[in-house]
Amino acid sequence: MVELNSEAARISELAASGERMVERLRHQSILPETRKTLTVTWGIAEVAQFLGCSTNRIRQAETDGRLPPAPDGRRQGYSIDQVLNMREVLDASPRRGPNDRPAIIAVQNFKGGVGKSTVTTHLAHSLAVTGYRVLVVDCDSQATTTTLFGFNPHFNVSREETLYPYLSIDPTQADLLYAVQKTPWPNVDIIPSNLELFDVEYELAAQGADGNSVLVTRFRKLKAGLQDLARNYDVVLLDPPPALGTISLAVMQAANALLVPLAATTPDFCSTVQFLSMMEQVIGQLELGNIEVNFDFVRLICSKFNSGDPSHEMVRQIMEQTFGPALLPVPIFESAEISHAAMRMMTVYELDKPIGAPKTHKRCRTNLDEALGQVEQLIRSSWGRVSPASPQEIIHEAV
Ligand SMILES: Nc1ncnc2c1ncn2[C@@H]1O[C@H](COP(=O)(O)OP(=O)(O)O)[C@@H](O)[C@H]1O
Ligand SMILES: [Mg+2]
């Protein structure tokens, strides 16, 4: 056996020390194993805004018995179940019609740290509040999205619960139903991931000359499996790994829409340009192999914008000039609420009270609603639907 030199041997010390710390943090509940409940509630004004109706309409339905009595005197504590029930009773469900194809959106960029998982999870929860049925598929072995849904991939997700048994070279599952798990949100499900999903990539590398046919089989499988599942949802969100591998390619052609997050920095801009060139080449190759890639929309979203930083403003202008209307006009602001919520394995939509100053929280939520609302509009236009009323119109109606 080859002897490791002392610096290389240090890696095992570091790993062991890291494992001990993870265990300690877990013990002190700083690193929770799992989080099962959703405690966030909303006030009547906000609920009316989600539903696109007046607060009077809700009060009226509570008075005439179509809705259960208000949860408290001040009507401040509506749960997600109550909001979803309200949608049914007041006929305010935004669900797709039977002939509308479910939106299958890849939130993709080959760069890590651009906000893919942050956008995926916040978009899922924002669509859930708005009443859509959402499936989130964590296709990244780094499993940040899985974590933000309150699962700790380190402790409570096994390889058998990920996409692996379906995409493996020796598949043990014929469809994807086995992998769908409930989340704390009644209308959001997830297919979780963990580090072992990376075995899919190893297996392909080991195939040598047969690699291509394995690749094509996996493309077809992921697409077919997701299309099957998508029948039960309005929107499917795919969070692929930040690299060009089997899963990334399979996601690209299983999706029918593409959302590319990037921060307003020069490195993100440059690597996104590379990503787009690579996409173009890959799509060309796929089409040569008779594999169709078909998107209802392709948009870029600035995912970490700091308006107080002049360099961000500069890069955003460059992005606008370069991408034109493909860049969504409203960026997601960089916010401590987002990073603090992430530490608690949550999104901002799940916080029952602000972590920082109430003003910071409010600004963050308002911005997320607006930025992610742009994506909702794209989904609705792919179904040929008219836009729901704007918040201004709703407020006007409520007065
Ligand atoms: N708008 C934002 N405001 C503050 N922090 C953010 C924002 N978007 C992402 N982050 C943080 O940046 C880091 C990388 O984001 P992540 O979504 O994990 O990127 P990716 O999935 O592309 O690797 C995370 O720590 C996340 O909390
Ligand atoms: Mg990620």
Image (tube, helix red, strand yellow):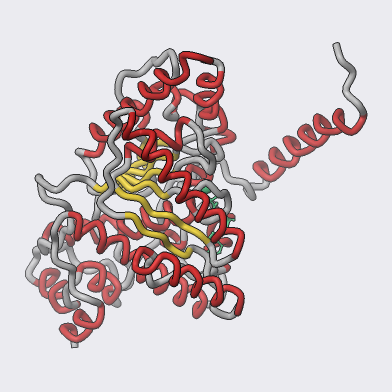
State the image quarter where residue 142 is shown: top right
Closer to the camera in the image, 72 or 247:
247
**Residue at figure coordinates x 52%, y 51% from the top left:** 274
Which residue is the extreme one toward the left? Answer: 64
Is residue 73 toward the left or the right of residue 121 in the image? left
Closer to the camera in the image, 163 or 37:
163
Is residue 119 toward the left or the right of residue 217 in the image? right
Q: Is residue 246 above or below residue 308?
A: above
Q: Position of residue 60 (x, y in %)?
A: 11, 74
**Residue at figure coordinates x 18%, y 68% from the top left:** 387
Q: Is residue 183 visible?
A: yes
Q: Is residue 82 visible?
A: no
Q: Is residue 53 above or below residue 351?
A: below
Q: Position of residue 322 (x, y in %)?
A: 45, 67
Query: Which quadrant does the C terminus fall into?
Result: bottom left
Query: Which quadrant does the N terminus fall into?
Result: top right
**Residue at figure coordinates x 59%, y 65% from the top left:** 265
**Residue at figure coordinates x 17%, y 77% from the top left:** 54
Which residue is the extreme one toward the bottom? Answer: 399
Q: Position of residue 227 (x, y in %)?
A: 25, 35
Total marks shown come to: 0
